[in-house]
Image: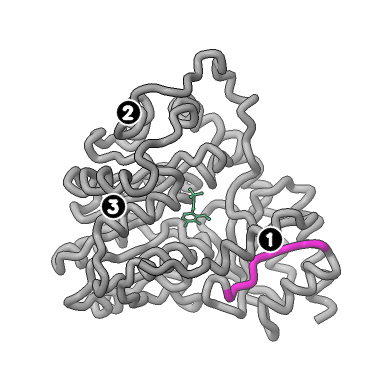
Amino acid sequence: MRFEKMEYLDWVRSKSKVRINLCPSGMRNFSLQNFGLDRDKLEIYGDNMYGYPPLLEAIASRFKVREENVVTAIGTSHAIFLVCAALLQAGDEVLIEKPAYEPLLAVPRALETVISRIERKYENKYQIDLDEFDGSISQKTKLVILTNLHNPSGTFLKRSTLKDMAEIAQKRGVWFLVDEIYLDYMEGEERETSFSLAENIIVISSLTKVYGLGGLRCGWILAPSKIVKKMRSIIDYTSVEGVFIGEQVSAGVFSQLDSILEKNKELVKQNSMMMRNFIQKEEKLSWVEPAAGILCFPKVEGLTGDRLASLLLEKYNTSVVPGRFFEDPQHIRIGYGVTSGILARGLENIKKALGEL
Ligand SMILES: Cc1ncc(COP(=O)(O)O)c(C=O)c1O
């Protein structure tokens, strides 16, 4: 294994103190005060050898799967590592969407696999062409990696498309990993996990983004039981067990997820409208409108995302993510899970900066 620095994660950490920070990809942080949990009942030690049983149960029941199909992880980040470590050997090929969230590329790279790409093009509204996908799978491909909703663009792949893709992969003996960390922004059937769509699908997610609960580091993997067993033995190399006190809080929070979502939805709706109005009026920006959520990846006309991001930072104490961190330098990624007041100020600053360039 060889571990290279993750450029994006390194960069984004350094922006956490910027006054108007539109880099984060999650909702504002939720506080423990809001949950009414009985803190006197929390314990430091307890039974959590393969995950805290009430937490495993809560995850299994939310996604209507069996507990033998659930692994708890320390955030989706840990989940990415566990899935890749369980499925991949040095020299295997991994087919990953482009543009992609950096760790989805960096972890397979660290495991010394060969990376190939399936393009999600702006011109094609970040959708995936099935024939192209079929043609991108080789004899050596072991795993396909996608996000749904897509980070950075916030676009959605229909369940029928995912099913078709997973079936194509399955015929070739290839695993199909879907990172669903943003999926709960969708409504109705489209919000349902893709796990049950095909036997080769593995799903990862966490409470970090949609629920603003990143500090709990509550992540999970839904996978066939034989892969679950393998991942549980890999946990002995990483963390051995979860943090019991965090697992107890997470298990308690699961029953309140729907009400958190309801509260967050109002802000998402308001900010999405503000974002849409802004892009429609701003000549130098164009976008593929996200299906839901608080991430978008607009294209900047006539200059690079880096140039715009630098001016915003230097002159307006405002940060957005330059598109080069998501493999497309003509873009910027804007996260709008902030208060509407902060978003309004951030967009005003983007407008001023664009006027100067
Ligand atoms: C697609 C995707 N997966 C995983 C993560 C990491 O999530 P977690 O905080 O649960 O480790 C992120 C964070 O930005 C992400 O965008």
User: Which residue position is annotated with label 3?
Assistant: 202
What is the spatial separation of the Cα atoms under label 2 and label 3, in whole angstroms?
A: 18 Å
Counting residues from the start of the chain, the first of labels 2 and 3 encountered is 2
Which of the two residues, 68 or 277, is positioned nearer the viewer here? Answer: 68
Q: Under tag 3, what secondary structure? A: strand
Q: Is residue 39 left or right of residue 63?
A: right
Near mark 2 (Cα within 10 A), the count class, few <14, some 14-19 or many ≥20, is: some
Counting residues from the start of the chain, the first of labels 3 and 1 encountered is 1
Q: Percent from the top left, x then y, of residue 43?
A: 47, 19
Near mark 1 (Cα within 10 A), the count class, few <14, some 14-19 or many ≥20, is: few
The kind of residue tagged 3 is Ile
The kind of residue tagged 2 is Glu
Counting residues from the start of the chain, the first of labels 1 and 2 encountered is 1
User: Which residue position is annotated with label 2?
Assistant: 57
Q: How is the image coloured?
A: one colour
Marks 1 & 2, CB-CB < 8 Å contact: no
User: Which residue position is annotated with label 1?
Assistant: 14
Q: State the extent of the magenta-drawn residues as a range.
A: 317-324
Assess whether residue 318 is covered by the magenta stretch: yes
Q: Percent from the top left, x then y, of residue 142?
A: 23, 67
Q: Is residue 278 left or right of residue 255?
A: right
What is the spatial separation of the Cα atoms under label 1 and label 2, in whole angstroms?
A: 37 Å
Assess whether residue 111 is covered by the magenta stretch: no
Residue at screen point 38% across, 70% down: 109
Q: Under tag 2, what secondary structure? A: helix
Q: Quadrant of residue 8?
A: bottom right
The kind of residue tagged 1 is Ser
